[in-house]
Amino acid sequence: MSRRRPDPGITSHEPFTVDSGFHRALRAWFRQVRRPLPWRQSRDPYRIWVSEVMLQQTQVATVIPYFHRFLETFPTLSDLAAASEQDVLRAWEGLGYYRRARSLHRAARILARDHGGEIPHDAEALARLPGIGRYTLGAILSQAFDQRYPAVDANVARVLCRLAAWDKPLETSSTQRWLHATAETILPERKVGEFNQALMELGSLICKSSGPKCLLCPVRSWCRSAQRGLQELLPRKAKAKELHTVVEAAVVLRRRNRLLLVKRSENSVRWAGLWEFPHDGLRNGEDVPTALCRLVENDLGLRVSLGDHLGIITYGVTRFRYQMHVHVAKVVGGRLRLRNHGEARWMRQDQLADLPMPSPQRRVVRLLEETASQQRVQRSPKPSSPIQCRTCNGTTRNESCGNPDGRTTAWRRRWSSSARDRQAGRRRSMRLGPI
Ligand code: SF4
């Protein structure tokens, strides 16, 4: 079935306003259905701030365990300010978008230094902190201090576009301006934090991106899209960006039982300050072994003996899909130099748990552990089966009990009568125990 395009003649760009009935209906619905999320248990600005930073680009269900772990590690703003950046990144590990953690940490240090460890009520002071954008500012001020600020996240943007039947693509600057102006216009006088959360909850539970449940919607009477049957078509989105595949070569360099880890520089666009195994994308026409040679010899100045291919790690970042081929190699010479990284360490494998690493690199560690455990299983001697001798009626392990027929050293050999044995006319006086 073909999807109808929104008709600019039908959809509207006139201002969208609501009355107090809208606020009452939304609030009453929210009080019935609100999820008991851990950051909703109090109005502590620190908890609200941490949760809002974590929720940027990340789903609620993913954030919950990280939120608990982070708050256990850094229960107060002072604890966060006093921690090292490496500890903060380690606590954040797995949540991605590490710039958020670094900004949170820097902001905590500024607040500890300049504001006595308190989060300010003042919008200007708050907006000057690193990592506090328009959304986070509105969320903290409205939820913690009940100030009249809107908080427009992806859920709220979708709800507003549908309520007002706004048909311009979400990503355009005119839509963004309209969204913030409209979100401000419809704020109630009181309980603004609750109202902002109710709009977000509406977007999460009812006005979902696909399949909005309009029949269950508490504000259906105010919704222009529902009245005009446009709810499935709005908001309009810009054309999806094409996905690109990138093949990478990564190497686990081993020297006397230690592995080489390098730290990404503080200016890296992605994963700044995190540790990783050396890796790089394949360049014009290179294959993986050639890229590994370039990486190890040219960039790191080492000579190696290349070992096994450990596996392929696949992961996605924005519109890129990465395939990282991981090899192990033993260092046989050369002198380590760093061209693209700020720091390097030779570490035992059991020390890697304390290092903050990007998720794909943590998966390389798991791959190493799995390979080592498989190798241990292959190397370990098989348990011998007890051999019971009918003559001595005793149990031995690969040792003769005195009976010449008991001198067999064959592992788990079944003493069935083979054709050769029958020819030799030998009688079996022994049998193996259960295998
Ligand atoms: S009526 Fe439908 S489209 Fe309108 S806000 Fe409610 S769920 Fe969204």
Image: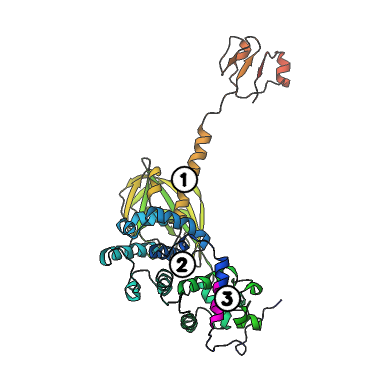
Q: Between tags 2 and 1, which lies in front?
A: 2
Amino acid at the residue labelled 3: Ala
Where, by quadrant of the figure, is residue 150 drawn? bottom left
Amino acid at the residue labelled 2: Gln
Residue 209: give x, y in percent of width and height: 59, 72
How many neighbours does mark 3 have within 10 angstroms: few (below 14), some (14-19), or many (20 or more)?
some
Q: What residue span does the magenta drawing correspond to?
A: 18-27
Residue that badge 1 annotates = 368
User: Residue extending furthest left?
Assistant: 113
Vertical position of residue 414 compared to residue 392: above or below: below
Vertical position of residue 9 compared to residue 89: above or below: below
Q: Is residue 329 magenta?
A: no
Residue that badge 2 annotates = 56
SS at circle 2? loop
Q: In the image, which disc is placed on residue 25?
A: 3
332 left or right of 389? left
Amino acid at the residue labelled 1: Leu
Q: Which of marks 3 and 1 is nearer the N terminus?
A: 3
